Image (cartoon, rainbow, N blue to C red):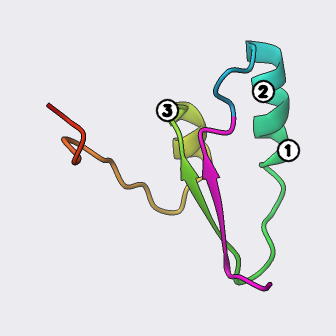
Amino acid sequence: MQSNYLPFDEITSGLDFELAEEVLDALRVPRPIGMALIRVTHEMRFAREMADRIVYMVEGPFAR
């Protein structure tokens, strides 16, 4: 299967700080041309550093 999108959903959840940093470092490599990485994260520092575009979800369907 070939796709132009690679989704990640909270890939560092449940990891200790050091291991989480290793995972985030691995994602800092340049992505293939034409590949969009879609990341769901609470790691805002990482999101600001890496993103071309950021979308904030506020009061989504599960918000009260």
- Determine the CA span between mark 2 and mark 1: 9 Å
Type of the residue with mark 3: His
Side of 45 relative to 60 (left or right): right
Report helix, strand or loop for mark 3.
Answer: loop
- Residue 21: give its label: 2
Identify the residue at image location x=68%, y=81%.
Answer: 4
Identify the image quadrant of the C terminus: top left
Identify the image quadrant of the N terminus: bottom right
First of labels 2, 1 by sequence position: 2
Query: Which contiguous range is marked in magenta?
Result: 1-11
- Which residue is label 1 attached to? 26
Of 56 and 12, the residue lying toward us: 12
Identify the residue at image location x=78%, y=49%.
Answer: 28
Q: In x, y percent, where is residue 31?
A: 78, 67
Report helix, strand or loop for mark 1.
Answer: helix
Of 43 and 64, the residue lying toward us: 64
Type of the residue with mark 1: Ala
Relative to residue 47, is residue 39 depicted above or below?
below
- Determine the CA span between mark 3 and mark 2: 14 Å
Type of the residue with mark 2: Glu
Q: Residues within 10 Å of mark 1 (few under 14, many from 20)?
A: few
- Determine the CA span between mark 3 and mark 1: 17 Å
Tell me where residue 2 sits by quadrant: bottom right
Of 25 and 64, the residue lying toward us: 64
- Which residue is label 3 attached to? 42
Q: In x, y percent, where is residue 38?
A: 57, 61
CB of mark 3 within 8 Å of CB of mark 1? Answer: no
First of labels 3, 1 by sequence position: 1
Side of 52 relative to 8 (left or right): left
Q: Residue furthest left?
A: 64
